[in-house]
């Protein structure tokens, strides 16, 4: 499955992020993008190497949300609470996440 990120032109709110299946045009998931003093959107949303998962970091809550892209549901129906979470990265060859936390 291929996905793209876009926004709805008639909505005057640049904090809304939408993910579409480019093959069907189907809207798969809406997100309100996190805001932070520094960093790009790539700091918050990261895809697994095979596109099977999408991880979303919410800085103010210290939570990492991992979604299965088949149906965009949370893995195990919950976010991972990681106090002091600063950043994370997916493995380039496996669906494993490495996190850096300052405690």
Image: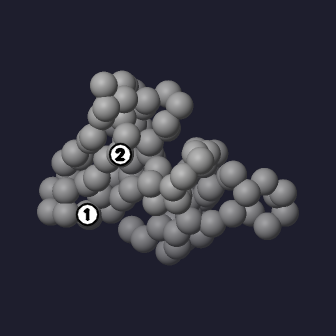
Q: Residue furthest left?
A: 93
Which dot, 1 or 2, sits closer to the camera? 2
> In the image, what residue occupies the spot 36% across and 58% down?
47
Distance from label 1 to label 2 (Cα)? 17 Å
- Label drawn at residue 49: 1
Is 43 left or right of 47, judged from the image as shown? right
| Whole-percent x, y for residue 94 in the image | 15, 56
> In the image, what residue occupies the spot 44% across and 54% down?
43
Q: Nearer the viewer, residue 28 or 14?
A: 14
The N terminus sits in image quarter: bottom left
| Whole-percent x, y for residue 89 in the image | 28, 52
Q: Nearer the viewer, residue 28 or 92?
A: 92
Give neighbour class at mark 1: few <14, some 14-19, many 20+ (Cα, 10 Å): some
SS label for mark 2: strand
> In the image, what residue occupies the spot 19% across and 56% down?
91
Task: Answer with the quarter of the image where residue 103 lies.
Answer: top left
- Label drawn at residue 5: none
| Whole-percent x, y for residue 57 in the image | 44, 42
Give neighbour class at mark 2: few <14, some 14-19, many 20+ (Cα, 10 Å): some
Q: Is residue 82 above or below residue 32?
A: above
SS label for mark 1: loop
Is 14 left or right of 93, judged from the image as shown? right
Is 43 left or right of 93, judged from the image as shown? right
> Can residue 82 be seen?
no
Q: Nearer the viewer, residue 93 or 40?
A: 40
- What residue sits right under mark 2 in the picture? 87
Task: Answer with the quarter of the image where residue 85 lies.
Answer: top left
The answer to the question of whether label 1 and label 2 lie on touching residues, with beta carbons closer than 8 A, is no
Q: Is residue 14 above or below residue 82?
A: below
> Can residue 56 be seen?
yes
| Whole-percent x, y for residue 87 in the image | 35, 45
């Amino acid at each position: 499955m291929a996905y793209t990120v876009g926004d709805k032109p008639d909505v005057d709110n640049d904090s809304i992020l939408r993910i579409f299946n480019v093959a069907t045009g189907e809207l798969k998931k809406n997100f309100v993008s996190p805001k932070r003093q520094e960093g790009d959107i790539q700091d918050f949303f990261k895809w697994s190497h095979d596109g099977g998962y999408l991880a979303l970091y919410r800085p103010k809550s210290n939570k990492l949300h991992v979604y299965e892209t088949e149906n965009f549901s949370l893995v195990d129906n919950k976010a991972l609470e990681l106090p002091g979470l600063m950043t994370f990265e997916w493995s380039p060859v496996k669906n494993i996440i490495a996190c850096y936390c300052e405690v």
